[in-house]
Image (tube, helix red, strand yellow):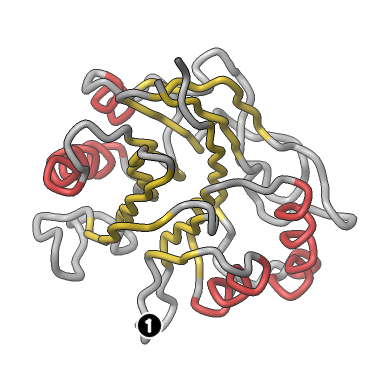
Amino acid sequence: MSGPRFSVMSLNLRFGRADDGADSWERRKDRLRALLREHPVDFLCAQEVNLFQADFLRECLPGHSVCGVRDPAPAFWQNNVITGSPAWERTGCARFFLSDSPWVPSRFAGSKWPRQCTVAVFRREGLEVACVNTHLDFRARVREAAARVLLEELEGLVPEGAPVVLAGDFNAAPGEPCYRMLTERGFEDVFREHGGGTWHGFTGRARGGRIDWILSRGGVSAVEGRIVTGAFGGGYPSDHFPVMAVFEAG
Protein backbone atom coordinates (compact mmCIF):
# COMPACT_ATOMS: atom_id res chain seq x y z
CA MET A 1 0.00 0.00 0.00
CA SER A 2 1.39 3.40 -0.94
CA GLY A 3 2.00 6.12 1.60
CA PRO A 4 1.49 9.89 1.47
CA ARG A 5 2.67 11.93 -1.48
CA PHE A 6 4.70 15.11 -1.17
CA SER A 7 6.15 17.66 -3.56
CA VAL A 8 9.54 19.36 -3.69
CA MET A 9 10.80 22.36 -5.65
CA SER A 10 14.43 23.42 -6.00
CA LEU A 11 15.28 26.92 -7.20
CA ASN A 12 18.47 28.95 -7.27
CA LEU A 13 16.80 32.22 -6.34
CA ARG A 14 19.66 34.35 -7.69
CA PHE A 15 21.66 36.48 -5.27
CA GLY A 16 19.41 39.41 -4.40
CA ARG A 17 22.16 42.02 -4.38
CA ALA A 18 23.23 41.29 -7.96
CA ASP A 19 23.02 44.17 -10.44
CA ASP A 20 20.61 42.51 -12.88
CA GLY A 21 18.96 45.62 -14.33
CA ALA A 22 15.50 44.73 -15.61
CA ASP A 23 15.77 41.43 -13.71
CA SER A 24 16.88 42.89 -10.39
CA TRP A 25 15.39 41.43 -7.23
CA GLU A 26 12.85 44.22 -6.76
CA ARG A 27 11.51 43.53 -10.25
CA ARG A 28 11.54 39.76 -9.71
CA LYS A 29 9.67 39.61 -6.41
CA ASP A 30 6.22 39.50 -7.92
CA ARG A 31 7.35 36.88 -10.44
CA LEU A 32 8.47 34.64 -7.58
CA ARG A 33 5.19 35.18 -5.77
CA ALA A 34 3.32 34.17 -8.93
CA LEU A 35 5.48 31.04 -9.33
CA LEU A 36 4.81 29.90 -5.78
CA ARG A 37 1.10 30.60 -6.14
CA GLU A 38 0.84 28.59 -9.36
CA HIS A 39 3.07 25.75 -8.16
CA PRO A 40 2.52 25.20 -4.42
CA VAL A 41 4.79 22.53 -2.94
CA ASP A 42 5.34 20.85 0.41
CA PHE A 43 9.05 21.68 0.47
CA LEU A 44 10.92 24.49 -1.25
CA CYS A 45 14.72 24.29 -1.44
CA ALA A 46 16.09 27.70 -2.42
CA GLN A 47 19.74 28.63 -2.94
CA GLU A 48 21.55 32.01 -2.99
CA VAL A 49 19.03 33.48 -0.56
CA ASN A 50 19.85 36.79 1.14
CA LEU A 51 18.10 37.64 4.41
CA PHE A 52 15.65 40.01 2.74
CA GLN A 53 14.79 37.28 0.24
CA ALA A 54 14.20 34.82 3.09
CA ASP A 55 11.85 37.38 4.64
CA PHE A 56 9.99 37.58 1.33
CA LEU A 57 9.64 33.80 1.23
CA ARG A 58 8.07 33.92 4.69
CA GLU A 59 5.63 36.54 3.41
CA CYS A 60 4.75 34.42 0.35
CA LEU A 61 4.41 31.20 2.35
CA PRO A 62 2.59 32.03 5.59
CA GLY A 63 2.63 29.21 8.09
CA HIS A 64 5.57 27.44 6.46
CA SER A 65 8.56 26.63 8.64
CA VAL A 66 11.86 28.11 7.47
CA CYS A 67 15.21 26.41 8.02
CA GLY A 68 18.73 27.43 7.02
CA VAL A 69 18.78 31.19 7.56
CA ARG A 70 21.77 32.68 9.33
CA ASP A 71 20.66 35.87 11.08
CA PRO A 72 22.59 38.07 11.64
CA ALA A 73 24.67 37.19 8.61
CA PRO A 74 27.98 38.44 7.20
CA ALA A 75 27.81 40.86 4.30
CA PHE A 76 26.79 39.20 1.02
CA TRP A 77 25.89 35.99 2.86
CA GLN A 78 23.91 33.46 0.83
CA ASN A 79 21.67 30.92 2.54
CA ASN A 80 20.33 27.56 1.41
CA VAL A 81 16.78 27.78 2.73
CA ILE A 82 14.23 24.99 3.16
CA THR A 83 10.59 25.87 3.74
CA GLY A 84 8.12 23.25 4.90
CA SER A 85 4.34 23.23 4.51
CA PRO A 86 2.27 23.56 7.70
CA ALA A 87 0.94 20.07 6.93
CA TRP A 88 4.37 18.72 7.99
CA GLU A 89 5.90 18.90 11.47
CA ARG A 90 9.56 19.86 11.35
CA THR A 91 11.43 17.68 13.83
CA GLY A 92 15.03 18.67 13.09
CA CYS A 93 17.17 21.25 11.34
CA ALA A 94 20.93 21.56 10.81
CA ARG A 95 23.40 23.40 8.60
CA PHE A 96 26.99 22.43 7.91
CA PHE A 97 29.71 23.66 5.61
CA LEU A 98 31.21 21.82 2.69
CA SER A 99 34.78 22.06 3.92
CA ASP A 100 37.39 20.28 6.03
CA SER A 101 35.66 21.77 9.11
CA PRO A 102 31.95 21.23 8.41
CA TRP A 103 30.63 22.58 11.71
CA VAL A 104 32.37 25.96 11.68
CA PRO A 105 31.91 28.62 8.98
CA SER A 106 34.60 27.70 6.45
CA ARG A 107 35.33 26.76 2.86
CA PHE A 108 37.58 24.48 0.88
CA ALA A 109 40.66 26.08 -0.62
CA GLY A 110 39.65 27.02 -4.14
CA SER A 111 35.97 27.46 -3.29
CA LYS A 112 34.69 30.92 -4.19
CA TRP A 113 32.07 30.98 -1.43
CA PRO A 114 31.60 29.16 1.88
CA ARG A 115 29.37 26.45 0.43
CA GLN A 116 26.76 24.99 2.75
CA CYS A 117 24.26 22.19 3.16
CA THR A 118 20.97 22.54 5.04
CA VAL A 119 19.14 19.47 6.35
CA ALA A 120 15.58 19.52 7.68
CA VAL A 121 13.59 16.52 8.91
CA PHE A 122 9.80 16.54 8.62
CA ARG A 123 7.08 14.18 9.85
CA ARG A 124 3.53 13.53 8.63
CA GLU A 125 1.20 10.55 9.00
CA GLY A 126 3.99 8.46 10.48
CA LEU A 127 6.41 9.24 7.64
CA GLU A 128 9.69 11.00 8.36
CA VAL A 129 11.48 12.62 5.43
CA ALA A 130 14.90 14.29 5.41
CA CYS A 131 15.04 17.20 2.99
CA VAL A 132 18.56 18.31 2.02
CA ASN A 133 19.42 21.53 0.17
CA THR A 134 22.89 22.38 -1.12
CA HIS A 135 24.83 24.47 -3.62
CA LEU A 136 28.16 23.16 -4.91
CA ASP A 137 31.14 25.09 -6.22
CA PHE A 138 32.21 25.97 -9.76
CA ARG A 139 35.35 23.79 -9.66
CA ALA A 140 35.10 20.05 -10.28
CA ARG A 141 37.64 18.99 -7.64
CA VAL A 142 35.90 21.14 -5.02
CA ARG A 143 32.54 19.65 -5.94
CA GLU A 144 33.93 16.14 -5.48
CA ALA A 145 35.31 17.01 -2.04
CA ALA A 146 31.99 18.62 -1.13
CA ALA A 147 30.00 15.55 -2.19
CA ARG A 148 32.23 13.42 0.02
CA VAL A 149 31.61 15.66 3.05
CA LEU A 150 27.89 15.76 2.33
CA LEU A 151 27.61 11.98 2.29
CA GLU A 152 29.63 11.63 5.49
CA GLU A 153 27.62 14.22 7.43
CA LEU A 154 24.23 12.91 6.35
CA GLU A 155 24.99 9.64 8.12
CA GLY A 156 24.59 11.35 11.48
CA LEU A 157 21.73 13.70 10.59
CA VAL A 158 19.15 11.48 8.89
CA PRO A 159 16.95 9.33 11.17
CA GLU A 160 17.44 5.62 10.61
CA GLY A 161 15.27 4.39 7.78
CA ALA A 162 14.06 7.83 6.73
CA PRO A 163 13.92 8.64 3.01
CA VAL A 164 16.20 11.45 1.83
CA VAL A 165 15.47 14.01 -0.86
CA LEU A 166 18.58 15.90 -1.95
CA ALA A 167 18.06 19.03 -4.04
CA GLY A 168 20.08 22.03 -5.12
CA ASP A 169 22.30 23.77 -7.62
CA PHE A 170 25.21 21.41 -8.20
CA ASN A 171 26.97 23.49 -10.88
CA ALA A 172 27.53 20.22 -12.72
CA ALA A 173 25.64 18.23 -15.31
CA PRO A 174 24.61 14.62 -14.69
CA GLY A 175 27.45 12.19 -15.27
CA GLU A 176 30.16 14.36 -13.76
CA PRO A 177 32.22 12.89 -10.88
CA CYS A 178 30.23 14.48 -8.02
CA TYR A 179 27.02 13.15 -9.58
CA ARG A 180 28.47 9.66 -9.85
CA MET A 181 29.60 9.77 -6.23
CA LEU A 182 26.04 10.45 -5.09
CA THR A 183 24.28 8.01 -7.40
CA GLU A 184 26.76 5.27 -6.50
CA ARG A 185 25.67 5.75 -2.87
CA GLY A 186 22.06 5.01 -3.65
CA PHE A 187 20.66 8.34 -4.80
CA GLU A 188 18.39 8.24 -7.84
CA ASP A 189 17.94 11.16 -10.21
CA VAL A 190 14.33 12.22 -10.73
CA PHE A 191 15.26 13.71 -14.11
CA ARG A 192 17.67 11.08 -15.38
CA GLU A 193 15.65 10.78 -18.61
CA HIS A 194 15.32 14.54 -19.06
CA GLY A 195 17.88 16.24 -21.30
CA GLY A 196 16.89 19.87 -20.73
CA GLY A 197 19.13 22.47 -19.09
CA THR A 198 18.21 24.68 -16.15
CA TRP A 199 20.40 27.81 -16.30
CA HIS A 200 19.09 30.35 -18.78
CA GLY A 201 20.41 33.76 -17.66
CA PHE A 202 16.90 35.33 -17.66
CA THR A 203 16.46 34.54 -21.37
CA GLY A 204 14.11 31.58 -21.07
CA ARG A 205 16.48 29.55 -23.27
CA ALA A 206 18.52 26.94 -21.43
CA ARG A 207 22.29 27.23 -21.76
CA GLY A 208 24.27 24.08 -21.11
CA GLY A 209 23.19 21.02 -19.19
CA ARG A 210 20.93 20.46 -16.21
CA ILE A 211 22.85 21.72 -13.19
CA ASP A 212 19.86 21.77 -10.80
CA TRP A 213 18.97 18.31 -9.51
CA ILE A 214 16.53 16.52 -7.27
CA LEU A 215 17.79 13.14 -6.07
CA SER A 216 16.24 10.68 -3.62
CA ARG A 217 16.97 7.46 -1.83
CA GLY A 218 15.28 5.13 0.64
CA GLY A 219 11.58 4.38 0.70
CA VAL A 220 10.19 6.95 -1.74
CA SER A 221 9.76 6.95 -5.50
CA ALA A 222 9.29 9.87 -7.87
CA VAL A 223 5.93 9.78 -9.64
CA GLU A 224 6.39 13.12 -11.41
CA GLY A 225 9.25 15.43 -12.33
CA ARG A 226 9.36 18.60 -14.36
CA ILE A 227 11.47 21.62 -15.20
CA VAL A 228 9.29 24.74 -14.98
CA THR A 229 10.30 26.77 -18.03
CA GLY A 230 7.48 29.29 -18.18
CA ALA A 231 7.55 33.00 -17.39
CA PHE A 232 5.56 34.52 -14.53
CA GLY A 233 4.30 38.07 -14.39
CA GLY A 234 6.02 38.93 -17.66
CA GLY A 235 9.45 37.55 -16.75
CA TYR A 236 11.47 34.91 -14.93
CA PRO A 237 11.80 34.73 -11.13
CA SER A 238 15.44 33.64 -11.47
CA ASP A 239 18.20 33.00 -13.97
CA HIS A 240 17.62 29.28 -13.27
CA PHE A 241 14.49 27.33 -14.08
CA PRO A 242 12.83 25.75 -11.04
CA VAL A 243 12.79 21.95 -10.90
CA MET A 244 9.92 20.08 -9.25
CA ALA A 245 9.15 16.52 -8.24
CA VAL A 246 6.33 14.60 -6.60
CA PHE A 247 7.23 11.61 -4.43
CA GLU A 248 5.24 8.74 -3.05
CA ALA A 249 6.21 6.80 0.04
CA GLY A 250 6.11 3.03 0.26
Is 10 displayed left or right of 33 in the figure?
left
Q: Position of residue 114 (x, y in %)?
A: 29, 63
Q: Residue at 64% across / 35% down in the picture?
A: 207
Is 143 displayed left or right of 197 in the figure?
left
Q: Position of residue 121 (x, y in %)?
A: 32, 50
Placement of 105 over or under 144, stated as above or below: below
| Extreme residue toward the bottom, this view | 72
Q: Residue at 50% across / 73% down in the picture?
A: 50
Along the line of sight, the residue nearer the viewer: 25 or 3: 3
Along the line of sight, the residue nearer the viewer: 175 or 245: 245
Type of amino acid at the residue the image marks with label 1 = Asp
Along the line of sight, the residue nearer the viewer: 235 or 84: 84
Along the line of sight, the residue nearer the viewer: 217 or 162: 162
Is 48 displayed left or right of 71 in the figure?
right
Q: Quadrant of residue 107?
A: bottom left
Placement of 147 over or under 23, stated as above or below: above
Placement of 179 over or under 76, stated as above or below: above
Total number of numbered labels?
Answer: 1
Q: Position of residue 126 (x, y in %)?
A: 36, 39
Q: Quadrant of residue 118?
A: bottom left
Q: Residue at 57% across / 30% down in the picture?
A: 246
SS of the residue under disc 1: loop
Is 171 displayed left or right of 153 in the figure?
right
Q: Residue at 35% across / 83% down in the picture?
A: 74
Quarter of the image with the N terminus in it: top left
Q: Position of residue 153 (x, y in %)?
A: 15, 46
Q: Is residue 116 visible?
A: yes
Residue on which disc 1 sits: 71
Q: Is residue 145 visible?
A: no
Quarter of the image with the C terminus in it: top left
Label 1 environment density (alpha carbons within 10 Å; few <14, some 14–19, many ≥20)? few
| Extreme residue toward the right, this view | 234
